[in-house]
Amino acid sequence: IYITHNLGVVSQISDRMLVMYGGELVEDAPTKQFYQQPLHPYSRGLIDSVPKLGENKQDVNLRPIEGRIPSLDDLPKGCIFRPRCPLAIEICKDYPPLYQSGENRHSRCHRWEEIARGEVDPHQPVPEKKGELKKDQDRGTLLRTEDVRVHFTESRSLLDFLKGKERPRVRAVDGVTMEIPDGVTLGLVGESGSGKTTLARAIVGLDKYTDGQMRLFDIKLPSGLQTRDKEILECLQIIFQDPEEALDPYMSVGETLRRPLMRFRSLTRDQADQKVAELLQAVNLSPEFASRLPGEMSGGEKQRIALARAFAPNPGLLIADEPISSLDVSVQAAILNLFDELQKENQNATLFISHDLAVVGYLADVVAVIYLGQLMEVSPVEAVFDPPHHPYTEALLSSVPLIDPEGEQKRIRLSGEVPSKRESVSGCPFHTRCPRFLGDICVEQTPPWREMEDSGKRYFCHIPPEDLLEDQERPFAFSDQKEKKGENNEN
């Protein structure tokens, strides 16, 4: 029994799918049949909430499930999904049995037969797209980092101290140069320990960078918080992965949101209270949430409050560090849509950090791939899924679970361990694990940055693009893409 909210993982490893809602089993089906046609509106809503690898916000709308899951001590009568169901009718006020909806499958929905025949649409409504971002020609560079390094010294053991050994030095970020234009979402991806969070903390000032330079609106950004003025603190805001730790459990939502409004925007108490109500509305929460404490809210609601707090000072750059990884898929979809809406409304830039390439590919305009504290590839989102890829990007793409049990994916298994950040790696930092290792050149020489003029993709590798293109294909294909490819081959 594998329990998760990750629909991509279970589509690849499970034989059967069981879907629960409000403490009840609502659907049970063989995995392939479930993904081909779910026969409960809640199941359909879950699948529609997850971005597929290769989809982007410009082309696809995620459909979060409207409303919220009921409290287990106050379940609705009849079908427990009825208050959130797009197909709810009078019969749904009666409690549904677990109908046999096919060979070896079941659905707790009165209307499963209509869904199976295609007579009704179980999809949630498509949210309305709001606002537009600036055109490319109107954008300036908001943040630029130049060869930024963040190195730490660790404490020594007593034995190392007695032996006179120096404190080990950790190279968390080891020379990152990148730009974030105004109004653009830059997605930063990489494995755990690759330096994503340390870079984000250095930008916002929670960690000091030890070398290089950062410029905000072409003004040098001091290292650390102590020497930064009020305007810089207002311009840079961060959302952490766990809203449980980001919110003071003893401060009400109103107090949490009021504080940055009065401190950074110099609003009076009455003005701040009015703005609090507007912020709650912007993240789709009612004004009565202002009186609640964090312990009275769900994880998704807390993350919305964290998002509202980050937007309260109207920042120029919002840094989001794995902000949805702990949330269930429907709440994830709602938060992703909120990021898009609020960015268009405020015209701010966003650094969105995740290990999930499907999520980053959906929300970002530009994708940067980081390994061992160094960038390996930077690409416009429309080009990041097509070859040529840096070998590390290729491996990451091959490891994303497809939400399609009949999809095809090239499997690349990286051998060896990630080198220690205490040691300096010569040549290409990826050479110890690279499946396309060339030999001494990768060990002894620093790779060049290669740029594709037609797409704007840049990657850090000794292998020229024409050689990569000979060996690389798109590393994944969904079942409907396979069918189209087969039809084209026949034609």
Image: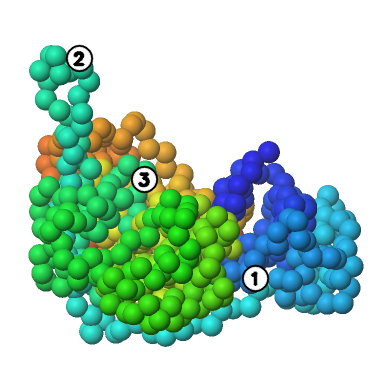
In percent of width and height, residue 445 lies at 11, 41
Which quadrant of the figure contains the C terminus?
bottom right
Q: Is residue 375 left or right of residue 302?
A: left
Check disc 2: other Cα within 10 Å, few if <14, some if 14-19, many if 20+: few
Looking at the rendered structure, the secondary structure element under dot 3 is loop
Q: Nearer the viewer, residue 407 or 15?
A: 15
**Which residue is at a point 30% across and 84% down the rendered structure image?**
134
Instruction: Estimate the spatial distance between the alpha carbons at disc 3 and disc 2, rounded to whole Å.
Output: 32 Å
Q: The disc labelled 2 sits on which kind of residue?
A: Leu
Check disc 3: other Cα within 10 Å, few if <14, some if 14-19, many if 20+: some
Instruction: Estimate the spatial distance between the alpha carbons at disc 3 and disc 1, rounded to whole Å.
Output: 34 Å
* CB contact under 8 Å: marks 3 and 1: no
Looking at the rendered structure, the secondary structure element under dot 1 is loop
Which callout, 3 or 1, points at the residue further toward the start of the chain? Answer: 1
Which residue is label 2 attached to?
Answer: 159
Q: Nearer the viewer, residue 270 or 180?
A: 270
Which residue is label 1 attached to?
Answer: 67
Q: Is residue 357 left or right of residue 98?
A: left
Q: The disc labelled 3 sits on which kind of residue?
A: Glu
Looking at the rendered structure, the secondary structure element under dot 2 is helix
Which residue is label 3 attached to?
Answer: 191
Where 361 falls versus 223 (above or below)? below
